[in-house]
Image (cartoon, rainbow, N blue to C red):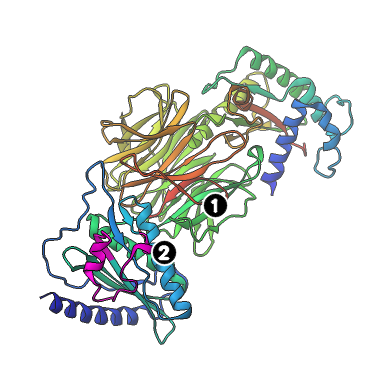
Amino acid sequence: MPSVMRFSRAARFAAIIVAALTIAACANKPNEGLDGMSGAAAVPGSQQDFVVNVGDRVFFESDSTELTPVSRATLDKQAQWLSQYNRYSFTIEGHADERGTREYNIALGARRAQATRDYLAARGINASRMRTISYGKERPVAVCNDISCWSQNRRAVTVLNAGS
Amino acid sequence: MFDNELTRAQKGLTRRGLLAGAAAFGSLAGSFSGIFSGVAPAFAQQRAPLRLDITQGNVQPIPIALPDFSGGSGADAEMARNVTGVVTADLRRSGLFAPIDPAAFIEKNPSFDAPRFPDWRAVNAQGLVTGRIARQGDGRVQAAFRLWDVFGGTALDGKQYVTTPDNWRRISHIIADAIYERLTGEKGYFDTRIVFIDETGAKERRVKRLALMDQDGANVRYLTRGDDLVLTPRFSPSTQEITYMSFGQGDPRVYLLNVETGQREVVGNFPGMTFAPRFSPDGQRVIMSLQQGGNANIFTMDLRSRATTRLTDAAAIDTAPSYSPDGTRICFESDRGGKPQIYVMGAGGGAAQRISFGEGSYSTPVWSPRGDTIAFTKQGGGGFGIGIMKIDGQGERILTEGYHNEGPTFAPNGRVLMFFRDPGGNAGPSLYTIDITGRNEQKVPTPSYASDPAWSPLLS
């Protein structure tokens, strides 16, 4: 069951990126350790604040693990925020698009998560706060047969641990 | 001479049948074993005109007649019809046999021992199978068949099996394998199973379950409930165990699952994610990838000693390892040269030889049970194809290509591949088979979307 909850949480964060208005619907599901999600305005230091005002994810080019200038800018903001709110531990989820094979994409997602982790560590985030996991191509956020979806799925998402 | 041979054969069948019956007592108990075959009777070693040469590229299927096995009345008669149906379907799906429409048959209920050959010649049958099902006093079932060369008027093969009634599908597959082997000279692959991933739900939140079925799609059984994401299941050589990757609590790991007992364990105490597992041909080791920072390296674990051995140490993704059938070599996928390509190394690791050099990238290599070829997924030109090449990389052939085809697995005789095809979008993947000649592509029926198939060895 914990894995299912993790997926649902990730999916919900994704929904916020696409349409912030869905937050109200999420708040109708209490007791999932996401109290910071409720309310329309992001409370500074809340998970919602991180997702909406900092940006919880960075994107990659096809079959690449290189952090783009845009990604580095996002991770700089993440590092700043995570330093300020250092009570959070978090998991970096690495993902690949569907245009690769199962095993390779597992490793590719892991490499993306690692690149993200290394960058945050270099910006002073303590390694003990960070965990990485790869979902390969198993958890796309956008579904279609062209680059408009694939480019959203090639990502590393920083997921704050709900209990921290 | 013919009559004498047949008489001797009948005696043989009876004797063997009794022996088989005696041996079968007390050893069934729902296991995969428990089917005992009689030995083929000693027919005359004469010239066998009815023989299919499947070494040629373009094979003309053999017209074969499969009238319903006789089965007395009631449930036995129904079982006899069902057995005939499964044997017929197996042979038809192989693409090497053309079962004749029973409506055309002149002799409606041929004698098990003495069919009227002129009637079968008249419907252009080259092969004919007669069979019968009989219930023993102990409730078990005797199934017997004869394979006839219609033009020569001779019996080519005949076997008898004794088993519990619930094994009727396996008996059917075993009979189909015997016919296939007698007429092609190669082992069949019908008495086998497929382990695969059953997929349901929306693509963003797909539920994946470990599932097992017969090679023809029958008898689907789910081995996990779908709580945890599971991927890439593979059979042990004994078919009693499956190794696969599962996302549970903590890091995703390679697991072992005993199919009979349901007992599950993590493979090895590795400090990180393990994935892409397969058994060694002797079943004593599991080979897999271990994620170490940004790199994936190949390790083995000895299942008895629990000792782990590192086989690769490149600053790269090394994954999807597969042993040669003699266990001396390993093919795997690595992006050490930039893009994923196929490499071959010794079973102890060390220097690896790149064998794939075509346009695009190559993934998921799997060694043929015959030892002479490697099948793979090839990505290029915006699509994904399934192909094979010799183990030195020569003679590459793409068997099928399209938007997304992935993950080939060989039938135990090395003549057929199964893989999955995903049309993309919100739809999901299905399983297909294709001959290594590139012909006879067939969809495999599954209850819902299905991916990551792995073919078992022959069960008997």
Badge 2 element: helix
Q: Nearer the viewer, residue B389 or A102?
A: B389
Badge 1 element: strand
Left or right: B63 with respect to B247? left
At a point 46% along the width and 73% down the height, the residue shown is B78
Which percent across, then down, holds residue A164?
77, 36
Q: Which mark is residue B85?
A: 2
Question: Type of residue at label 2?
Answer: Gly
Q: In terms of image quadrants, where is residue B345? A: top left
Q: Chain of mark 1?
A: B
Q: In terms of image quadrants, where is residue B88? A: bottom left
Q: Can you name the residue that lies furthest to the top here?
A: A69
- Magenta-drawn stretch contains A36: no
Which percent across, then down, holds residue B203?
63, 38
- Depicted B26 relative to depicted B259: above or below: below
Magenta segment range?
Answer: B101-128
Q: Can you name the residue that lies furthest to the bottom here?
A: B137
Which is the main secondary structure of the residues drawn in magenta?
Answer: loop
- Magenta-drawn stretch contains B116: yes
Q: Chain of mark 2?
A: B
Q: Which residue is mark 1?
A: B210
